[in-house]
Image (cartoon, helix red, strand yellow):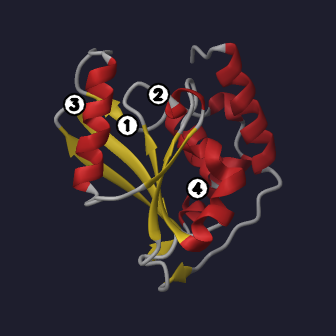
Amino acid sequence: MNLSLPRLFLFIYLLTACERAQFKDQVTQTYGLADRSSEYRDLVSKNPKELSGEQLYNRALTLWDIPYRELKLPTSNGSAHVLVSGPVDGKPLVLLHGMSVDSTMWYPNIKALSEHYRVYAIDDIWGAGKSTPSHEDTEITTLVAWYFEVFELLQLQQINLIGASQGGG
């Protein structure tokens, strides 16, 4: 696997932090979500060098110590991977990650953000996450149109938005 230096440091940090993660095996009706981290628990004990990019992502999700769902949405520019957490009736909050990382970067904040908001953490189609582009178009207008398509698929009319680094741009 070819990793940039910042991405490598993030993976190392997330992988070592996984060793300390607490796991919950429950389904929470209040949120309409499941604690998916239990599905990925076995990845924590495996050697990170032997894991695929998707397995490393799933391992990092064990740090999300709240119930969540993973959505895969088909779009005109590829599939969108979205992590959803928080109360169903909460105000929508969209999280856009920084460059060379993915939505798992929000693990230190996700519990607090999900207390009152319905959180949608979207892996962008150019990033390291689970969203996959259908072509090589790297125009910013394509990315912006793609986000609006994702918002429409999620039926989000008014949102609160937090972006880190490139996601803030």
Amino acid type at image mark 2: Gly
Any part of residue 63 in sight: no
* Comes first in the chain, label 3 or label 4: 4
Q: Residue at the location (41% across, 50% down)? A: 82
For marks 3 and 4, give the one nearer the viewer: 3
Q: Amino acid at mark 1?
A: Ser
Q: Residues within 10 Å of mark 1 (few under 14, many from 20)?
A: many
Residue that label 4 marks:
40
The label nearer to you, 4 versus 2, is 2
Q: Which residue does the numbered mark 2 point to in the structure image?
A: 127
Find residue 20 and report its image quarter: bottom right
Residue 110 horizontal side relative to residue 120, left or right: right
User: Whole-percent x and y of residue 141?
Assistant: 28, 23
User: Residue 110, position in %: x, y?
Assistant: 63, 58
Q: Nearer the viewer, residue 23 or 7?
A: 7
The residue that appears at 52% across and 68% down in the rendered structure is: 117
Read off the residue under disc 3: 77
Above or below, 106 against 136 in this view is below
Q: Which residue is mark 1?
A: 131
- Mark 2 lies on a secondary structure that is loop
Mark 1 or mark 4, whichever is nearer to me = 1
The x, y position of residue 153, in whole percent, is: 23, 53
Residue 81 figure quarter: top left
Viewer-side residue, 51 vs 32: 32
Which is nearer the N-term, disc 3 or disc 2? 3
- Does residue 48 appear left or right of residue 58 in this picture? right
Q: CA distance from mark 2 to mark 1?
A: 8 Å
Residue 2's disc number? none
Residue type of the residue flagged with mark 4: Tyr
Residue type of the residue flagged with mark 3: Asn
Q: Is residue 74 left or right of residue 48?
A: left
* Relative depth, front residue between 37 and 105: 105
